[in-house]
Image (spheres, rainbow, N blue to C red):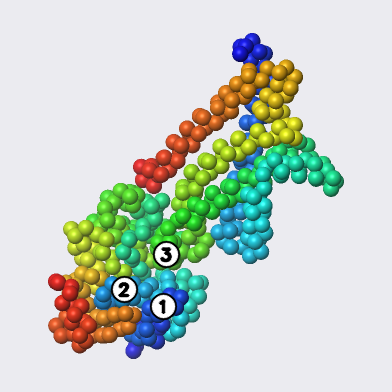
């Protein structure tokens, strides 16, 4: 495929002897949004962590922008500037202000001009309604605010591709919408390529171009979003959707 | 107990007091420097050097200061290295304290959560940048309680210097007792002198710990 951003072939992952990912194969094209669904413990987080080198894997190959990824730490370090990731627990750096949290990547890793970066960050913070908190420390923010900052921190590196690992799972219900809206905007306005692990079924239904349904470490379905929610192929997926109550 | 005897002994105790403070200060600063170097070598897993320093840490932590001092003071001259008593004391204290400080710093660095490290990696930080901006600042704050305990510990350990006749506080007291047999008075002054150094210091360090635990990173 010409505009393929990422391709995963025959990926296998073990934790010691435990086989946690079985022969994973899929690819994602530019601008596409994939949601990764499945019961807890099915390997969703492990899979997306493999995609930016936070987990190593035993067999298989990852191709990013038509180049095979050599899985060395040095190589991943370069790639992570292009593959943004946001975590469930936000993980802002508590010792740095909001601005410094966001600035670290663009100015230290990418060595971009500080003034330009600052200007751009102001715009990004304005977009997520947090410009007033620029000089605050993470502990002064609510969970939802922290997560919005974490997204801005990832976006400030101008990634080609974003990974979201259950980013609303630790938020109070009233905070969830704000975070999801930002991700929705990324899909609608910036045409961002994304893989999203989530338990927010309504959101998944709304945003997913494609759904990968994962169970016990295997991809059981790789279906267009609309079809998955209306008419899933496997019984496991049907059962899963029924259990989710949305 | 005679206040007259105490009063007469004070000038001598004053000298011992200053010397205890002086040796402690050098010992603590030296130990901190050795500790930082050791913990950095261990953090970055510098090949060979980290094994060498591990041997040092094991020896230092598992032998008494008393024996370390005897070794420096009596065994070194036999090998042709003659050091003054004070220098032996300082080297001994740093040899001992360095490993304790190293453990303190390493404990802090290792205490920084894995998630912090991962989220640093996720924005492309190199190993060095991760250390410089995330692990060291956070780890240092975490290590402060251990460092504070080490500081108090090292000051108390200076009392062992008396065995190689360094005229610090304890040596002064034992000397005076040997000369005049007024053990009650001299031991009383000795206790008060250590308390004057250690109690305020301990309070200040506790405050500092509390500030670091609750106050930093945003207050």
Q: Quadrant of the C terminus of chain A?
A: bottom left
Parent chain of label 3: B
Label for residue A41?
A: 2
**What residue is rendered at 49% in x and 52% in y?**
B108
Q: Secondary structure at mark 2?
A: loop
Residue of label 1: A18
| Residue in the foreground of this view, choosing between A98 and A110 | A98
User: Which of the marked residues, 2 or 1, is nearer the chain's N terminus?
Assistant: 1
Q: Is residue B44 left or right of residue B11?
A: left
Residue B9 circle label: none
Which residue occupies 62% across, 31% down? B21
Q: Position of residue B44 (x, y in %)?
A: 57, 61
Q: As displayed, is residue A29 above or below residue A197?
A: below
Crowdedness of circle 2 by 10 Å Cα count: few (<14), some, many (20+)? few
Residue sitting at the far bottom:
A1
- Depicted B202 relative to depicted B213: above or below: above
Q: CA distance from mark 3 to mark 2?
A: 20 Å
The residue that disc 3 covers is B118
Quadrant of res B3:
top right
């Amino acid at each position: 495929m010409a505009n393929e951003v990422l391709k995963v072939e025959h990926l296998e992952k073990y934790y010691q002897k435990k086989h946690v990912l079985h022969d994973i194969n899929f690819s994602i094209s530019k601008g596409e949004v994939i949601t990764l669904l499945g019961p807890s413990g099915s390997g969703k987080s492990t899979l997306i962590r493999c995609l930016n080198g936070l987990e190593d894997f035993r067999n298989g190959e990852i191709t990013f922008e038509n180049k095979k990824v050599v899985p060395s730490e040095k190589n991943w370090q370069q790639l992570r500037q292009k593959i943004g990731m946001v975590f469930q627990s936000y993980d802002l750096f508590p010792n740095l202000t909001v601005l410094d949290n966001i600035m670290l990547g663009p100015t230290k890793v990418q060595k971009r001009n500080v003034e330009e970066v600052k200007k751009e960050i102001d715009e990004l913070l304005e977009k997520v309604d947090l410009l007033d908190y620029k000089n605050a420390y993470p502990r002064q923010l609510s969970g939802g605010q922290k997560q919005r900052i974490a997204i801005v921190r990832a976006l400030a590196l101008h990634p080609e591709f974003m990974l979201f690992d259950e980013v609303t799972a630790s938020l109070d219900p009233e905070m969830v919408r704000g975070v999801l809206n930002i991700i929705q905007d990324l899909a609608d306005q910036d045409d961002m390529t994304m893989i999203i692990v989530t338990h927010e079924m309504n959101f998944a239904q709304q945003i997913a171009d494609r759904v990968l349904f994962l169970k016990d470490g295997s991809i059981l379905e790789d279906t267009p979003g609309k079809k998955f929610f209306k008419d899933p192929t496997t019984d496991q997926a049907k059962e899963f959707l029924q259990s989710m109550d949305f | 107990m005679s206040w007259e005897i105490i009063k007469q002994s004070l000038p001598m105790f004053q000298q011992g007091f200053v010397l205890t403070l002086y040796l402690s200060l050098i010992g603590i600063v030296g130990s901190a420097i050795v500790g930082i170097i050791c913990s950095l070598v261990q953090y970055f897993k510098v090949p060979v050097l980290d094994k060498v320093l591990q041997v040092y840490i094991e020896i230092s932590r598992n032998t008494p200061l008393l024996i370390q001092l005897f070794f420096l003071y009596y065994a070194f001259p036999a090998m042709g290295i003659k050091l003054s008593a004070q220098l032996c004391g300082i080297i001994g204290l740093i040899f001992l304290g360095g490993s304790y400080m190293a453990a303190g710093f390493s404990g802090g660095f290792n205490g920084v959560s894995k998630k912090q490290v991962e989220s640093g990696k996720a924005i492309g930080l190199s190993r060095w940048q991760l250390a410089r901006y995330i692990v060291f600042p956070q780890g240092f704050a975490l290590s402060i309680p251990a460092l504070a305990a080490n500081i108090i510990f090292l000051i108390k350990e200076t009392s062992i210097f008396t065995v190689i006749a360094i005229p610090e506080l304890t040596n002064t007291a034992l000397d005076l007792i040997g000369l005049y047999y007024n053990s009650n008075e001299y031991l009383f002054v000795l206790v008060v002198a250590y308390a004057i150094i250690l109690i305020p210091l301990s309070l200040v360090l506790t405050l500092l710990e509390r500030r670091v635990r609750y106050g930093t990173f945003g207050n």
